[in-house]
Image: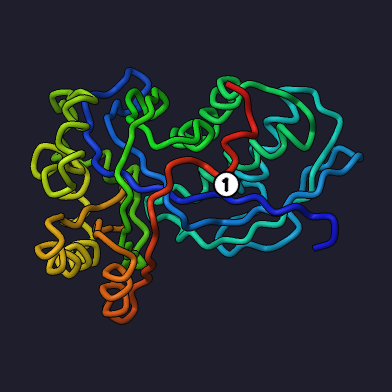
Amino acid sequence: MQDFQPYLAPAKINLFLHITGQRADGYHLLQTVFRLLDLYDTIYLKPNENGTVKRVNDVAGVPEAQDLCVRAATLLQQHTQCPLGVDIFLEKKIPMGGGLGGGSSDAATVLLALNRLWKLNLSRTELMSLGLKLGADVPFFIYGKNAWAEGVGEQLQAVNLQDAYYVVLNPNVNVSTAQIFANKQLTKNAIPKTMSDFSEVANSGMHNLGAEFTNHLEKIVCSEYPAVLDCLTWLNQFGLNQSSDARMSGSGASVFLEVASEKIATEICNQKPKGIQGFVAKGLNQHPLIDFASD
């Protein structure tokens, strides 16, 4: 990997997810809190002077043309008329299609890193606007802090979250986000909450989020994908001791449990059922590349 420079792309979880409406263009309006995790994809970049953007390794299940890393670099190049190109090597650690934001995070890291490598000096706001064209979660990763999110996920305000560890399980099923949002039983007009409502209960512990802050997609996903329900049920047996409940992230399939220490998280994760992916992660306070764009 000579001359390639590594850049980290962290995972995220949604501490809750409410659907508050739907726009005329079909996008759903939501409220959520995004939390960064210290599980990373690593993206290796090598700028070139011939203007080509290409991925130099194969990634299972991700054709190069659809890779958000490649799309992000191409979009940035076109937006700025930059004559430089880049070679991209992508090392995946974040489970794909699991509601952990891996593809979106990869795209954000490419935008942030190339902003510096190509000496573009775009502001964070400009990069977030570009990122939104690639996906609704991309602006959050460019924003770089744990955040209360509204709109389609692009209206962000920083939130302070207590240090915590998470057991994250992925039941190895691919949830169709479009199918879940199209389900007629999905509540799409939840009464909006306020950021202060969330902060008040979150600061006294995840156990107090309870029924007030849930994931509105969880019930639908569990009914259509029993493996997700099985993982939630299994994790919840440990939640009683941790005064917290297991939750699904995003539109699934990953589920998580907040616990008090890395030791407890590791002990739980080591008992996970066979055939289930799982890992322990600590919540981050900020993105590792937060200084790569100016506010």
Q: From where the camera sits, is residue 184 visible?
A: no
In this rendering, position of residue 244 left or right of residue 129: left
Query: Relative to 18, is 101 on the left or the right?
Result: right
The image's colouring method is rainbow
Q: Is residue 285 visible?
A: yes
Q: Residue at x 91, y 39 (%)?
A: 49
- Percent x, y for residue 256? 27, 58
Instruction: Give the residue type at disc 1.
Output: Asp
Q: For the residue labelled by badge 1, is the local secondary structure a helix, a strand or a loop?
A: helix
Image quadrant occupied by the C terminus: top right
- Residue 291 lies, in percent from the top left, at 61, 34
Residue occupied by mark 1: 106
Residue 22, x across and y down, in percent: 27, 24
Single out the residue that lies furthest toward the top: 24
Residue 95 location, quadrant: bottom left
Q: Say left or right for 46 vs 223.
A: right
Q: Where on the picture, by quarter, is residue 81?
A: top right
Where does the N terminus fall, quadrant-wise?
Answer: bottom right
273, above or below 120, in the image? below
The residue that appears at 14% across and 42% down in the rendered structure is 209
Measuring from the top left, give residue 11's x and y in whole percent: 45, 51
State the residue in front, 90 or 4: 4
- Residue in view at x 69 percent, y 30 percent: 76
Q: Taking 175 as reference, is 77 above or below it?
A: above
